[in-house]
Amino acid sequence: MILSGQCHCGSMKASFETQKTPVALGVRTCQCAFCRAHGAVNISDPDGCVEIDASAGAIHRYTFALRTADFFICKTCGVYIAAVMGEGQRIVSTLNVIGLGIKEFDGIDEAPMEYGVETTAERIARRYEKWTPTRFTDAELSASNFGPH
């Protein structure tokens, strides 16, 4: 199954390939101030694949707190679509289905998540274990590193 979406203006697109149904995947709502301010509802599947289709110039890469990931925000419309971490062939992400408008996740009960007690090492390890392997259509993004900073 391939599920796709885009930011409000369409400058940033993402596709999410998974063998699981949206209900089986579930959705998470991180309780940090950034995610709550953006109304983020996130998904990931370590057995799936994400492709982000956007030019490096369309993305504002925002980091905060432990600075372990880059949060992708559209420079034009301001929508947060993904958090990305890694380098080289080991890049993973979690997608914000609300920001991307992926309707297949509408109505699924949200699981509130608290990550504030994790150490930097614990956070990085969890993300590599739980987030989705990610690739980019833009060569500049493909050659980039994403957290920790």
Image (cartoon, rainbow, N blue to C red):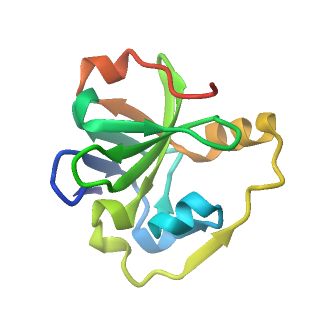
- Residue shown at 37%/42% (left/top)? 50
Give the quadrant of residue 123. Answer: top right
Residue at coordinates 65% horizontally, 41% vertically from top-left?
Answer: 129
User: Residue at 46% across / 74% down in the picture?
Assistant: 23
Q: Quadrant of residue 9?
A: bottom left
User: Compared to 140, does 51 lie above or below?
Assistant: below
Compared across the picture, whether 65 is left or right of 107 comes to right
State the residue in front, 18 or 33: 33
Position of 16 relative to 121 (above/below): below
The total of numbered circles placed on residues is 0
Image coordinates for residue 124, horizontal then vertical, percent:
70, 36
**Horizontal relation, residue 5 to residue 142: left or right:** left
Residue 102, position as x, y percentages in the image: 29, 66
* Image position of 33 (left or right of 81): right
Please, is residue 59 above or below residue 147 in the view? Answer: below
Q: Answer whether residue 41 is visible to the viewer in this image.
A: no
Q: Position of residue 114 (x, y in %)?
A: 73, 64
Q: Quadrant of the C terminus?
A: top right
Task: Confirm whether residue 116 shows in the render.
Answer: yes
Please provide percent x and percent y for residue 43: 48, 59
**In this orientation, which residue lies closer to the viewer: 108 or 41?**
41
Image quadrant where one finds the N terminus:
bottom left
